[in-house]
Amino acid sequence: MSSKSGSPSTLKLIGLVVAWYAGNTLYNVYNKKATNMIHAHWFVACAQLFVGMLWSIVMWVTGMRKKPNLTAADIAACVPIGLMACLSHAGSVLAMGVGAVSFAQIVKACEPVFAAVVGLIIPPMDLKPIAAYAMLIPIVGGVGIACIKEGKGVDINYTAFMWASIANLAAALKGKLGGSVTHSLKGDKSKNMDSANVYAVMNIISFLFTVPMVVIAELPTLQAEWDKAVSANGANAVIANIALSGFFFYLYNEFAFAFTASVGAVTSSVLNTAKRVIIIVVSSIVFIEPMERNTVIGSSIAILGTFAYSMAESSGKKAAPKKKAA
């Protein structure tokens, strides 16, 4: 199978996927450990972004990566995307902080539903193929089944569900608002905005938006929560879990951005769906999170629905040019 010169090698793509999956799984493990230790989850989310920001600065200062060359107008265009990145990240952290990692991942499988609605509401309208919209039914239905506990009926951690849904909405808005902006920045070589620098800039803006939320939501109780966490777990353990979760969060996102830039959004979306299966299985083992029959069946339906949605969306995009040429 021949490939064009300049296209990524199969070995490189496999390496990116392995690093992406490993980093994401380790992030979820250390993030849950950190949020179990200290009940100041906006602070944890903020600290994670701070770790990533430090990594970017080191890369730029040492010359290992070219510094972005952005104008004030470029930065202003990135601000709304950074805000959505802030809410997407914080929503995920808070959802997994107050509930099971597996439950948060099951709800986050609903992200295509939010993306489809946002695509219809916010111009320019993004119409999906009918088959893609049809796949939203098993996604929502699967999440619903996963929320039904045997002998208890519907059993939902509403706080975790709310934050995971906020993360989904923010991620959908980030994708809608960010597409044209990031494409434009990457297209201008003088700006030094490859996929790694695009993510680094968004991470910094996201951090700046998270700081006020820590001040508003947690500052009055932050010292007490920190002292309680250190007393119960030791300062080294608390700091290590927060730092490692921040490091792996940044790392896995950088690899995911690089992979998406190499193969396109649809393939990346499909693999992002498969990634959830690994996280659900690993978290259920590490944190002894019970996986009842309905949870397994429902999450399987939702994840397969997300996979089918990605494939239907892909086929629609491939068919569109043919209609114009006819």
Image: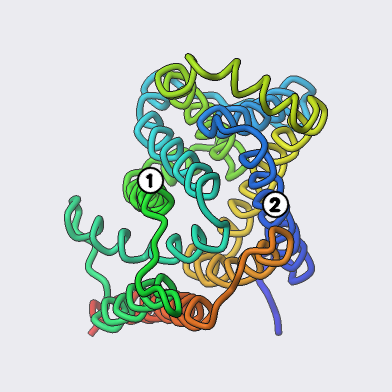
Q: Quadrant of the C terminus?
A: bottom left
Q: Quadrant of residue 69?
A: top right
Give the mark toward the camera: 2 or 1.
2
Q: Which mark is residue 174?
A: 1
Q: Residues within 10 Å of mark 1 (few under 14, many from 20)?
A: many
What's the amino acid at mark 2?
Val
What's the amino acid at mark 1?
Lys
Whether tag 2 and tag 1 are in contact, CB under 8 A, the answer is no
Name the residue rendered at 79%, 25% in the picture: 235
Disc 2 marks which residue? 29
Please state which of residues 264 and 132 is positioned toward the viewer in this rendering.
132
Residue 314 in sight here: no
Colour scheme shown: rainbow
Please state which of residues 242 and 250 is positioned toward the viewer in this rendering.
242
Name the residue rendered at 63%, 32% in the picture: 38
Name the residue rendered at 42%, 81% in the picture: 308
Residue 123 in sight here: yes
Name the residue rendered at 20%, 53% in the picture: 124
Indicate left or right for 285 with 292 as reference: right
Q: Which mark is residue 205?
A: none
- Give the secondary structure at mark 2: helix
